[in-house]
Amino acid sequence: DAGITQSPRHKVTETGTPVTLRCHQTENHRYMYWYRQDPGHGLRLIHYSYGVKDTDKGEVSDGYSVSRSKTEDFLLTLESATSSQTSVYFCAISESEGNGYTFGSGTRLTVV
Amino acid sequence: EDQVTQSPEALRLQEGESSSLNCSYTVSGLRGLFWYRQDPGKGPEFLFTLYSAGEEKEKERLKATLTKKESFLHITAPKPEDSATYLCAVQGISGSARQLTFGSGTQLTVLP
């Protein structure tokens, strides 16, 4: 997907455990985003980054944290997974704020 | 708060039967309106960006138009391979609205 990869693609985890999802890009884009997609809700922004170590909260940030120590990597951490965080998580990148986003293939996370 | 409403939620067409998808939006200052296509199990794929009322963009059998309150995605003589979920998103000009806000999508099925 145009130089953006997400890992893992699928994960099952238990309630209360920490989980980290990784987004890696080879496009050297400044902006990176984490969205979750749920039936009936569409894509909702969790966190985004506008540069190394520069991050901000999105619409549904509670229970999530992010880190960006390098341009190419954006990590999403669920500090203590809950069943309500079962979802498909998409990472996206953009060169500037006015451009369309390029999305990764997604991570399907199931919290049991 | 930015809002995006897409209709219909689902649409079934016969091959060759033209139709339109609607995206109604409210945003305090539109920077851009984006259309994406999403296939099952994949991330959204960028189609078009529209920036101002009256603008039109075309790609193969798809044509996107924009007014001050809504956008239409016209599909002319669709083929089964056009079956997908089509997502609309808006981007505002300030604050948290600089990030994309998505609608819930229209699931299009084109029958042979």
Image: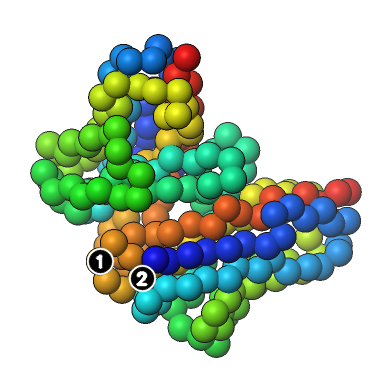
Q: Are marks 1 and 2 in contact (CB under 8 Å)?
A: yes
Tag shown at residue B92: 2
Q: Residues within 10 Å of mark 1 (few under 14, many from 20)?
A: few
Q: Amino acid at mark 1?
A: Gly
Q: Are marks 1 and 2 on the same chain?
A: yes
**Relative horizontal placement of residue B82, taking residue B2 as reference (left or right):** right
Residue A49 position, x and y percent, is 22, 49
Residue A21 position, x and y percent, is 32, 27
Asked if one can make out residue A29 in the rendered structure from this viewpoint, the answer is no
**Relative horizontal placement of residue A22, taking residue A106 as reference (left or right):** left
Residue lying farthest to the top in this orientation: A14
Q: Secondary structure at mark 2?
A: strand
Residue assigned mark 1: B95
Tag shown at residue B67: none
Question: Residue at horizontal 58%, vertical 34%?
Answer: B41
Disc 1 chain ID: B
Question: Residue at horizontal 42%, vertical 66%?
Answer: B2
**Relative horizontal placement of residue A71, taking residue B20 as reference (left or right):** left
Question: Residue at horizontal 59%, vertical 45%?
Answer: A40
Question: Residue at horizontal 81%, vertical 68%?
Answer: B18
Residue A30 position, x and y percent, is 21, 53
- Is B45 rendered above or below residue B31? above
Q: Quadrant of residue A26?
A: top left
Q: Amino acid at mark 2?
A: Gly
Residue B8 position, x and y percent, is 72, 60
Camera-nearest residue between B60 and A32: A32
Q: Residues within 10 Å of mark 2 (few under 14, many from 20)?
A: many
Q: Quadrant of residue B60?
A: bottom right
- Is A33 rendered above or below residue A79? below
Q: Secondary structure at mark 1?
A: helix
Camera-nearest residue between B57 and A10: A10
